Image (tube, rainbow, N blue to C red):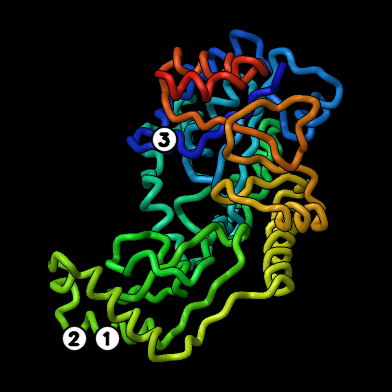
Amino acid sequence: MSIPVLMYHHVNELKDKFTISPDDFQTQMEYLARKNYQTLFLNELIDSLKKGKDKRRMALTFDDGYLDNWVYAYPILKKYNLKATIFVITSRIKEKSNSYHPHLGNVWNGESKKEDLPKISNHYQSNLRCVRNSAGSDDHISWEEAKKMSQSGLIDIQSHSHLHSYCYVSHEIVGYCRGDKWRTGWLTDGDLRLGIPLYEDKPALAGRKYSDDRDLRDGLAEYVSQRGKEKFFEKRDWKKELDGVASDYRAGNRLKDNYETLEERKKRIKNELLLSKNIIEKKVDKKCPFIAWPGGAYDNDLVKWAKECGYLGAVTTQPGTNTSNTDPMYLKRFEVKRGDLGWFKRRLFIYSHNFTASIYPKLKKLF
């Protein structure tokens, strides 16, 4: 047997691939309660794996700490007495002067009207506004709401890093800025000039940071600017033209770029891991020994440094089984992308059994 771990992001009325509706979420939670599933926090999950206690046990998790986790998900979880873990990005959580947004529970109790509930932004808009902003976000829960949920005994607040940022990891140019990629600001320190080169990137905790040649960046931005900026990209062969400019620069100049050293990377990452952990423990007044790898990306060094910082376990974005042989630093999850109950029940069954989970990827390829 295996203990399935479910991954959610948003629960609200918007429609995108990271979101399910409150009605669908309630249907799923009602099913878990009706079937007597025991929901676990991650420390309980690890203990259950060690003892082999896994029948009708599972874990619910939410990534990023969006406001709708408080407005919609929390009241529904509370209604059915189900536990969940919310992995928060600490730079995006701010104080709210001891006040709380109205939530679905207030509507049920007649204390608020449904139209009084906060307007929820979609996944892309939320992330776009958070790029290079470490002052907190109105699209995410507040520390007061996080602590309130934690004190209920149903919500565990854990780390999803401090920034959840991205960094370049290669000197190979993969494209050019056209103002249409939300995380470009992370990668370029806020530089969004049209035409600047874009390189292969990864979530910053899982990559060895590459810093590009600023003269090459300036030259390409100036080249596009002199040719009409947005109009330049109306050309059929604009990318080939910029590739030629970049190639000529590299052929005639010694690049002033660099990769961070292993020690520099270690210091950067451990600083962020500890910062997020310490903030959560201070704000919520509970231990923070778990992390969700940002973007689902990790490597052996990151896992090693997380352990050195006091993390006891981590969740991935890889579907699969969690058994007595599973390393707590690599807990598997499957993402809940659909609201229909049939799909939900089938995935629970698949990831509750080693055999079905092992053959499922092969069956997907066949059908």
Give the residue type at disc 3: Thr
Place of residue 186 in the rendered image (x, y in percent of width and height, measured from the top left): 47, 67
Secondary structure at numbered mark 1: helix
Residue 24 in sight from this viewpoint: no
Q: In the drawing, does residue 70 fall left or right of residue 306?
A: left
Residue named by callout 1: 222
Q: Pick whichever, 325 or 313, lies toward us.
A: 325
> Identity of the amino acid at label 1?
Glu
Which of pointers 3 and 1 lies earlier in the amino acid sequence? 3
Q: Which of 246 and 177 is in front in this view?
A: 246
Whole-percent x and y of residue 221?
29, 81
Q: What element carries label 2?
A: helix
- Residue at point 18% right, 86% down? 226
Which residue is tagged 2?
A: 226
CA distance separating discs 3 and 1: 40 Å
**The C terminus is located in which quarter?**
top left
Residue that badge 3 annotates: 19
Which class describes the residues within 10 Å of circle 3: few (<14), some (14-19), or many (20+)?
many
Q: Distance between the residues labelled 2 and 1?
A: 6 Å
The reply to whether residue 75 is in sight is yes
Q: Position of residue 141 (x, y in %)?
A: 54, 48
